Image (spheres, grey):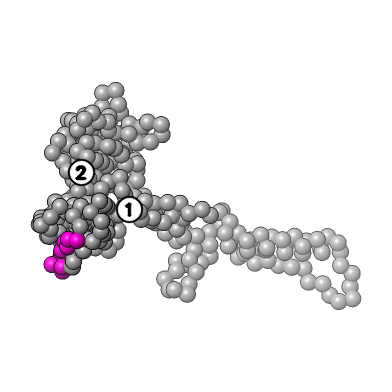
Amino acid sequence: MSENNEFILKTFIPGTKAKASEVNSNFSVLKDAINFKADMNGNELQPFSVANAEEDFQAMNKGQVKEIQEEMNAKIQKISSYFCAKSGNVTNGNADLFTYSGLTITSKVGGIYPNLVCLDYEGNQYTFDSFDDLSMVGKENGVYNIFVDTEGNLYVKKNIIYIQKTVPQMLEDDIWLDTSVEPVVCKKYVNEEYVDFHDIPLGKVYITNGAISKILTFSYNQNGYTLNSNSFINFYYDYTSVVGFAVNTTHTMTANGLLYVFSYDSNTTSVVSLDGYNFDVNFAYNTSTKGGYFVPVNRGQKVYVFASYSANVIFVPLKFRKENLCI
């Protein structure tokens, strides 16, 4: 091979004898040429001979592919691991930040437990070595998100956290991590406006029959964004979290679900109003039993049940869970 990367073969004249050494030399040159071509198309020690692609029909070189891969990995890491706790107490391999007694929540942060390290949606890091106890006295039944603000104060909100590209249907105090822009932004819906939100979600607390029934800590380094093609959302009616509603009172639905309207009085009629649309619910049955109807309702709807008799209303929320596909 010459200095200009030219491969020169020995030319043989027809009818003349070829020396074995010359034939073998030609084979060696061919081998070198093949190896050189392979190097030009992917060997780690030999760069591509392709310029940076600028048009759709042009091939990308290895450096461009690596650069794009690193950029995508950085974006995925930023979107999925911001707006969450990074490290803290662990029990049996799971994040574990809270315990409770009665209606008081106590944190497992500092002291005999590790400090808690968090990142807000912009990637700003906060380290906390203690929290004051959090009281749930006076909270109605339902599910509350537990947050910490940038000053280290714990609080709860009965709201929904959306992590998506499109604008969700938000109610007061709902949170939206907008992944459609770079860098991602986090907004809270307050008085029909979107305001910047730097607080960090840590977990959930469940109130059932006026008492704490369960506390969950969100996984570290994960804000819930990484749904993939091997998972799907399964919706179900959560009959363990039913809530009783008073009749003749307007209620704003905080989740999708079912209203169960029933009565102990026979041959009576109730009127259910959904966003001002009224329809009758008739009860006709033996007086020794009770009868009722399920009415589908959507989050944000205004619901009013008119009744002048012994009527009852129970709300069954629609929940979702991520499940792995069996593949």
Element under label 2? loop
Question: 59 above or below 210?
Answer: below
Q: Residue shown at 19%/33% (left/top)?
A: 103
Most common secondary structure along the magenta stretch = strand
Quadrant that contains the N terminus: bottom right
Of residues 258 and 112, which is closer to you in this image?
A: 258
In the image, what residue type sits under mark 1?
A: Tyr
Q: Quadrant of residue 236?
A: bottom left
Residue occupied by mark 2: 141
Magenta-tinted stretch:
267-278
Question: 158 above or below 299?
Answer: above
Q: Relative to 32, is 45 on the left or the right?
A: left
Which of the numbered marks, if any, corresponds to residue 237?
A: 1
Question: Is residue 270 one of those drawn in magenta?
Answer: yes
Q: Earlier in the sequence, mark 2 or mark 1?
A: 2
- Residue ranking furthest to the top: 112
Question: Is residue 110 one of those drawn in magenta?
Answer: no
Q: Quadrant of residue 217?
A: top left
